[in-house]
Image: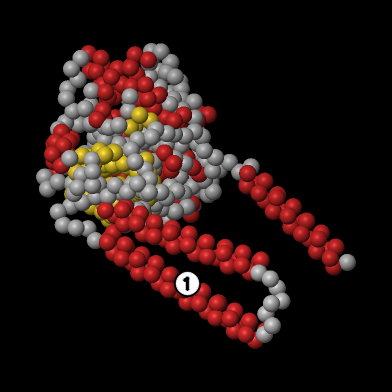
Amino acid sequence: MTMRRSAGGTRLASLLVLLVLLACAGCEREARRFDDRPPAPASGDAVRLTPLEAGPVTKQVSMEDRSDDNAWDTAQGKRLFSQFNCTGCHGQGGGNSGPALMDDMWIYGAEPENIYATIVQGRPNGMPSFQRLQSQQVWQLVAYVRSLSGLLAKDVAGGRDDHMQRKAQEQSTDPMKPRDAQPRPAGQP
Amino acid sequence: MIQLGGHSALHPAGPQAARIHDFWQFLWIVAAVVFAAVVAALLYAAFRRRGTDLDPPAAHRSAVRAVAAATVGSLVVLFVFLLLNFRAGQALTMPPDGAVHVKVRGHQWWWEVVYPAATPSDQVTTANELHVPAGRPVVVELTSADVIHSFWPPSLVGKRDLIPGDVATIWFQADTPGVYRGQCAEFCGHQHAKMGFLVIAEPPADFEGWLRRQRNSSATPADSVAARGQEVFLATQCALCHTIRPTPAGSRVGPDLTHLAGRRTIAAGSLPNDPASLARWIADPQGVKPGAFMPATPLEQADLDALVAYLGTLE
């Protein structure tokens, strides 16, 4: 009797383990895409900001490439953030000569496409245009920038840092409701 | 994978590799003798006639003696191994004077090689190739930009890990001019297997000449195709990650390409450095090295050809 019950228990346990493994396999937050996206469209008109515009209608960036549900992409965004020297002006998100990215103030919008446009087009008072970046890389940067103010799901945002850092990990940053901010007057730090 | 240069710990090309090899050979011979002795003892035990021992206490005594002798013999052999190991290790860790200093930084998945100089403009940066003078010791300072890698040119010296945040040093010497292959020996991600490098040992005069040439900037493109190629390089995403002196492209994210054409391989030993491979690597890096951090650069065929022609001029 005891024997039979323990055999049943083993079977139940293996079934549970199998289910957990299956659940992990179905999880896509770590999925990696090796196929490359084309580079961002040349010229700074990657994103249409208003339906009213002069001249030919600009091509809109495909939102299908957005990657704000993938931990791998967010981590790559973090890597690119220092490699492309975003840290030079924005620090580790706390801002320096550029505005802070880890607060709730957004001058040019907090939606992914707003941030995409800001990176690709550049903005007044010093933000350069990174229009030669590949769109997948821009989306990775967008994901990381949004994770700084807690706008990504906790299982997607970064959980650790390679360097010593005083701020909380992106994962433990509480979501901050985006607020509009005014750009700083030119020439003022 | 292209085969270039020696890549075998059993064909040592320098004093350290020779020491490791000698030690290994000694271990091998002793292990072979021990193995033969154990097999012989086993066969003797299996086939000897039973029941011949009329005096059990005497048989017991001789068995105890045999086990004691084997134990003492093993201890002696292991102690000799320990001493030889210690001596070999000691010889490997002491860099002699008058060495050439090189800094190697591991990246996912390539090697950045820097020859420091007192004058900053004389510093030379290259990738995936260590040029060294033959017959002179070379001290390599190892750091990592991301994860743990391991520096391993088996024909020259054993492995040394590159730990992020730490500086490790290793020294070696190539006795004769030649090309020796090296490999990352610590799993470091998707393309760990395609993270190779070459150690190119040259006569000292040739090495000095190479170092002098590396200090120069690249020449201005001479023909219109190469000039177009340079424009393509500077106008696309290439310039965001690579350096070509003296153009404005000065990023340190990817390998320095100022003297790319002088290298034998591209993509850390994954492809030979010829126009067809360059074109393939630029157009489809993920097909060559899936997961590599170099993104594809879709270009018109004419632009791609011009770019490859320009890169070919960077002697």
* Chain name for mark 1: B
Please state the horizontal and vertical placement of residue A31, each as a whole percent of the image. 54, 40
The image quarter containing residue A55 is top left
Label count reads 1
Give the residue drawn at x 43%, y 70%. B77
The quadrant of the picture occupied by the C terminus of chain B is top left
Residue A96 drawn above or below residue B215 = below
- State how the image is colored: secondary structure
Q: Can residue A42 be seen in this view?
A: no
Q: Residue at x 69, y 77 (%)?
A: B52
Q: For the residue marked with disc 1, what is the amino acid?
A: Ser
Q: Which of B74 and A88 is in front in this view?
A: B74
Q: Residue A127's image quarter?
A: top left
Element marked by disc 1: helix
**Would you say residue A59 is visible in this rendering?**
yes
Image quarter of the N terminus of chain B: top left
In the picture as drawn, the residue positioned furthest to the left comes out as: B119
Q: From the image, tell me which residue sits under label 1.
A: B74
| Along the line of sight, the residue nearer the viewer: A5 or B46 | B46
Q: Where is residue B215 in the image (x, y as percent from the top left)?
A: 15, 36
Relative side of B251 to B289, left or right: left
Q: In x, y percent, where is residue B235?
A: 29, 23
Q: Is residue B57 above or below residue B93?
A: below
The residue lying at 63 percent from left, 44 percent from top is: A25
Q: Where is residue B35 in the image (x, y as percent from the top left)?
A: 52, 62
Q: Is residue B186 above or below residue A3?
A: above
On screen, residue B18 versus residue A72, left or right, reads left
Left or right: B81 with respect to B18?
right
Which residue is nearer to you in this view: A103 or B158?
Answer: B158
